[in-house]
Amino acid sequence: MKCVFVFESVHRVMKAEKFLKGKGIKIDLIPVPREISSDCGVAIELSGDSEAEALLILRENKISVVDCYIKDLSGRLEKKKEILRDEDVTHEH
């Protein structure tokens, strides 16, 4: 199983690539699949095993993932219902 991360701009994809590769996460830059509507033409594909760690790294570096899709062995994409975004986290004082 693979995950596909979609971002709002190519600039964010490049920043995400830098941070993820810097932490040793194996990723591939891919064209955004036709089934996915996005303003950005490039997405990041990675192993499903790396998804949680990758999202944490991106969140720590303030890089928002617009959507996350699960890609099964047949290549079919399914949008994840929820991904953790900064605005979803409440901070207790």
Image: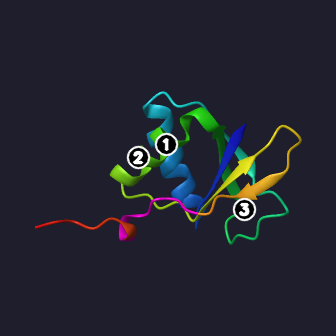
Residue 16: x and y, percent?
50, 49
Q: Mark 3, mark 2: which one is toward the viewer?
A: 2
| Kind of residue sitting beneath label 1 | Ala
Q: Residues within 10 Å of mark 2 (few under 14, many from 20)?
A: some
Question: What residue type is disc 3 on?
Answer: Gly
Amino acid type for the residue under numbered disc 2: Leu
Cβ–Cβ under 8 Å for marks 3 and 1: no
Q: Residue lying farthest top?
A: 24
Question: Which span is picked out in magenta?
Answer: 82-87
Horizontally, residue 93 falls left or right of residue 42, namely left
- Residue 65 % position (x, y): 53, 60
Q: Earlier in the sequence, mark 3 or mark 2?
A: 3
The Cα atoms of the two marked residues, 2 and 1, are separated by 6 Å
Q: Is residue 24 left or right of residue 27?
A: left
State the SS at label 2: helix
Pick the quarter of the image with the C terminus.
bottom left
- The residue furthest right is 74
Comparing 35 with 7, the one in front is 35
Residue behind mark 1: 52
**What colour scheme has been applied to the protein in the rendered image?**
rainbow
Q: Residue at x 86, y 45 (%)?
A: 75
Residue that badge 3 annotates: 41
Question: Which residue corresponds to mark 2?
Answer: 56
Magenta stretch holds residue 75: no
Residue drawn at 70 percent across, 49 percent down:
70
When the figure is inspected, residue 67 is found, relative to residue 46, above or below; the finding is: below
- Total marks shown come to 3
